[in-house]
Structure formats: C-alpha cells, structure tokens
Amino acid sequence: MAVIEKIEYWLALPVIQVGEFTLRLLDIGSAVGIIILTIFLSKVLTRAATLAGKRSRAHDQNIYVINRILKYLVYAVGIFMALSVLGFSFDKLAIIVGALGVGIGFGLQSIVNNFVSGIIILFEKSLRVGDFIELPNGLLGEVREVNIRSTLIRTLDNADILVPNSDFISNQVNNWTLNDDVRRFSIHFSVAYGSDLALVKKAGLEAANQVPMTIQRDKLLPDVLVRELANSGIECFLSVWTEGELVKRPGMVKSTYLTAIYNSLATHGVEIPFPQIDVHMRS
C-alpha cells in the first residue's frame, strides 16, 4: 500500500500551477498515452482499410486517399483529446484557434496553403502515387508519397526530393502517366547528304522492330521522318511508342533505340555525318 500511495502522490504532484490551472504528472502521462494510442490506432485502421480495399478490388489511389484522410482524422481527434486531458477547455481552444488565425495571417500562409493543396491533390487525383512527372525545371521523377506539407518525388538518380504541394497547384506539371502509361519517344539522328532517304527509313524501321519494347498496333506504329536539312547533314527522327515501366526510364529507352539505329545504319551502309565547314580562300 505504501508503494501505491507514493505512486499516487507523485502522479498528483503539480508540475505547473498558474492561478486556477494546475498541470500534474498524471495529466502529462495521460496525454502521452493518448498520443501513443493514437499512433497505434492510426496504423491499425489504415492497415485494415488497405486490406478491405484490396479485397473489394478498389483502385490503389482510392485506398491511398482513404488512408491519408483517415490518418489525418485520427491524429486530429487524438491531439484534441490530449489537449483536453492537459486542461485545455473549449473556450481556451477557441483562444488558441484565434491566435493561430493571427499567425496564419502573418507567417503560416505557406503551411496552410500546402496543406489545402495536398487535400486538393488527393481528391482531384491529378497527381497519384506511382505517377511519373516532369517538373517545370525539367526534373523527372516518380511520385512516392503525398504528405500534409509536401510531395515526395524520387528522381531517376534514386534521389528523394520534397516538393511543396502548392507548387503542383500553381505551376504547370507534366504528368506522363496520368491517364495511361503509353508515351511516344522521338529518337533524333543524322545522316549524310546524298543518302537514300528510302533506305534511311527502312533502316530506322528495322531498328525499331528489333527492339522488343516497340508497340506495333493500331495508330501507334513506328515511323521515320525528316526533321531538318541542317548544315552538316539531314536531321531525322524515329517516332516510336512504348508503355509500362519503360516510360519511367527515358534515358534507357533512348539509348536502346540509338544503339539499334546506329547498327542498322551501319548494316545498310548509310553514313552518319561529321560536322562540316566550307572555307573559301580569297587570293
């Protein structure tokens, strides 16, 4: 009994006492327990929602959105309960909300803007986990997470960067895989003047047919077109379509086709030009 009485004494011991407000160790311990329980409950509920979504064959993006919203709600309720245990009543919370409103007006606009933008992204589904995007600065990467403040992008160099959610709302973002995972690649190459363009086209199409990733259906057939009559040679490009995970590897795709084009041109004896300059000598 003496041990229990000592524990009760320490738990009832006031840590902070200002006027009528008293903060005890028991209150702090209860608040910490609520936070821990909130984190555990959030993980359990999101895992249960994921399993239920997979059983019902729901879309992965819908499952992700439900998990995020569920996580935000559980955390909000948990924080509210923890504050209540610490002695914050509704009128005090109203004062805090008013103070936060003043803070938002002065220095928290970006945080609120990013939070609202993240909610818009989740519900609008214009940016989903797994999408391959191109940022305004030309950076390519795959969307890994859509968080409260920022979105996690993994680049082709396997580097993770955080982009504020508001950037996706206010700036133009090129989503390569929004509606489907089929994309056209234009593989540029040059041939020397005097080359037989019919033979060049034949060599380019043979190169495309030799690459297994080339789509050969409907209107998505490969083609070779002349782009420009340049100073040093005839600029051409091979137009091909690929799909699936290959769309997220543009460097590898271009390298594969360029290798095939080079070998095919060499087989058909088509010359690849070198830079040429005409020099006129005046006597």
Image (tube, rainbow, N blue to C red):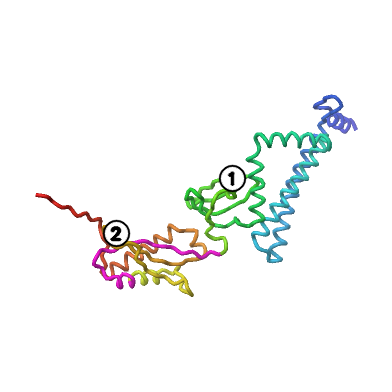
State the SS at label 1.
strand
Query: Three-letter amino acid code at disc 2?
Result: Ala
Indicate the quadrant containing the N terminus: top left, top right, bottom left or bottom right.
top right
Between residues 105 and 270, which one lies in front from this camera angle?
105
Q: Position of residue 48 (x, y in %)?
A: 73, 57
Task: Name the residue beneath numbered marker 2.
Answer: 230
Identify the secondary structure beneath mark 2: loop
Give the percent coordinates (x, y) of residue 203: 33, 70
Where residue 271 sits in the image (x, y, percent)? 25, 65
Question: Is 252 in front, or is 199?
Answer: 199
Disc nearer the start of the sequence (2/1): 1
The magenta segment: 180-202
Q: Against 211, is 3 above or below?
A: above
Within 10 Å of disc 2 (Cα), the crowding (few <14, some 14-19, many 20+) is few
Disc tally is 2
Q: Residue at x 83, y 30 (%)?
A: 24
Residue visible at 51% across and 62% down? 245
Left or right of residue 168, residue 55 in this image? right
Instruction: Check the image and report above or below for 274 versus 38.
Output: below
Q: Is residue 47 a member of the stretch shown in magenta?
A: no
Q: Which residue is mark 1?
A: 164
